[in-house]
Image (cartoon, helix red, strand yellow):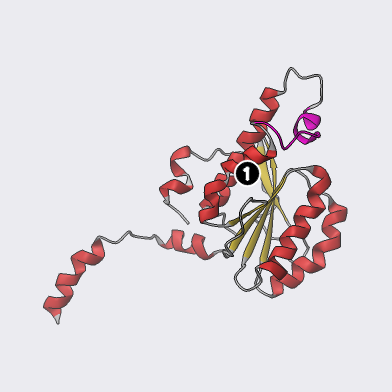
Amino acid sequence: MCAERKKKKPESENQPEMMISELLSAVSESEYPQFILDAISRVQEWMQEVTENNEDSDDDIFSAIFGEGYDDGDSGIGALIERLGDIGEYADVIPNSGTPEGKSDAVIISITPPEYESGLRSAIDYAAVFNRNTCKRVWIISDTFILDDVMKFSNHVDALSEQGITMRYILVTPWGWVELPLSGNTASKHAFLWRNENVPEEKTIRGKKKI
């Protein structure tokens, strides 16, 4: 028996090691998976590019991003969704031209201010109705936080939390981001912390260094 165990040991040593801190990070609802950090970074990059491309425009920057043609061209919202394409390996990205696969994580991109409530409503509908059986976390990435709209849905957020489905809201700007709670019951010490660190490209999800 001892000899057999010694033969199997080198094979196990070839398996990738996971530190205890990485394991805790993977299972904790308070940590940010690498694919979320990547998604936030790409949204910020897109915002910065749109800002730079419209510096000489007579229109204000919000008109440039959210005007009638915001979905057109290389800098439109459609281009942003394309940049997030490989995030689909880890989470269902909405909106998306394809059909969500039903992963345990979902990412809702809610960028246009008039559609913030729609983004929050989409998150709740997806978690409670369309992917109720497998959805565990929904990440809303948005550039807008409207307290009145959030208050309308706070009871829905609490009800989903009681069912084991977590709603996470990330407010993003070109200069940084912060997580804000969607209800008093789901607030945590990890919210309200402004973050402006850049995510190095070598740590992106393609490297699969972290969950």
Relative placement, left or right, of 111 versus 31 is right
Residues drawn in magenta: 61-73
Residue 155 seen: yes
Give the image location of residue 92, x and y in percent.
Answer: 60, 57
The residue drawn where x is 47% and y is 48% is 205
Q: Quadrant of residue 98?
A: bottom right
Label 1 sits on residue? 81
Reply yes or no: does residue 66 show up in magenta: yes
Q: Quadrant of residue 52?
A: top right
The residue drawn where x is 57% and y is 39% is 197
The three-letter amino acid code for the residue at tag 1 is Ile
The correct choice, above or below, for 84 with respect to 157 in the image is above
Relative placement, left or right, of 201 versus 128 is left
Give the image location of residue 64, x and y in percent.
Answer: 77, 29
Give the image location of residue 69, x and y in percent.
Answer: 77, 33
Q: Secondary structure at mark 1?
A: helix
Give the image location of residue 85, x and y in percent.
Answer: 55, 47
Relative placement, left or right, of 139 versus 144 is left
